[in-house]
Amino acid sequence: MNMILQDQRFLDVFKNKVIDVIAPASGTTPEKILMLRALSVLPLHIPDTLLSNDIAYHANTDEIRFELLKKALLNESEETIIWALRGGYGSSRMVVRVK
């Protein structure tokens, strides 16, 4: 396990919080998502629709990536942290959707 995940001071920052995981651009491997889901020391919320195997270069379709981003940004809870997996080319396509 990563040493930072053993540091109680670090973990205390996330006490009573929820971390919304989004992927506004490229994704990651399904294996890494499984590792994140198994990580019990952080309160991660990983949507089932985060990754698609059918989309090349991006985590999912523009529409789904935008909806997950919008949902995370519009969450009114002050106890939510947004964690964006990877950035890159696909992120700029989300700006076009806002207009």
Image (tube, rainbow, N blue to C red):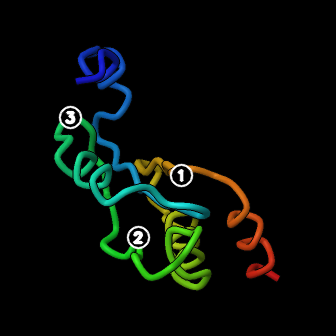
Counting residues from the start of the chain, the first of labels 2 and 3 encountered is 3
Give the secondary structure at mark 1.
strand
Q: Residue at x 51, y 51 (%)?
A: 85
The circle on residue 41 is 3
Quadrant, the N terminus: top left
Q: Secondary structure at mark 2?
A: loop
**Direction from residue 38 to residue 76 in the image, left or right:** right
Q: What's the amino acid at mark 2?
A: Leu
**What residue would you read off at disc 2?**
51
Answer with mark 3 or mark 1, whichever residue precedes in sequence. Answer: 3
CA neighbours of label 1 inside 10 A, class few (<14), some (14 to 19), many (20+):
some
Q: Amino acid at mark 1?
A: Ala
Horizontally, residue 76 falls left or right of residue 15, namely right
| Residue pictured at 50% horizontal, 64% vertical | 72
Residue 98 in picture, x, y percent from top left: 76, 79
Callout 3 amino acid:
Val
Bin the neighbour count of mark 3 within 10 Å (Cα to Cα): few under 14, some 14-19, many 20 and up: few
Numbered tag placed on residue 84 in the rendering: 1
Q: Name the residue located 60 percent from the left edge and 76 percent from the top edge.
A: 66
Above or below, 36 against 11 in this view is below
Q: Quadrant of residue 45?
A: bottom left
Residue at the spot x=27%, y=39% of the render?
42
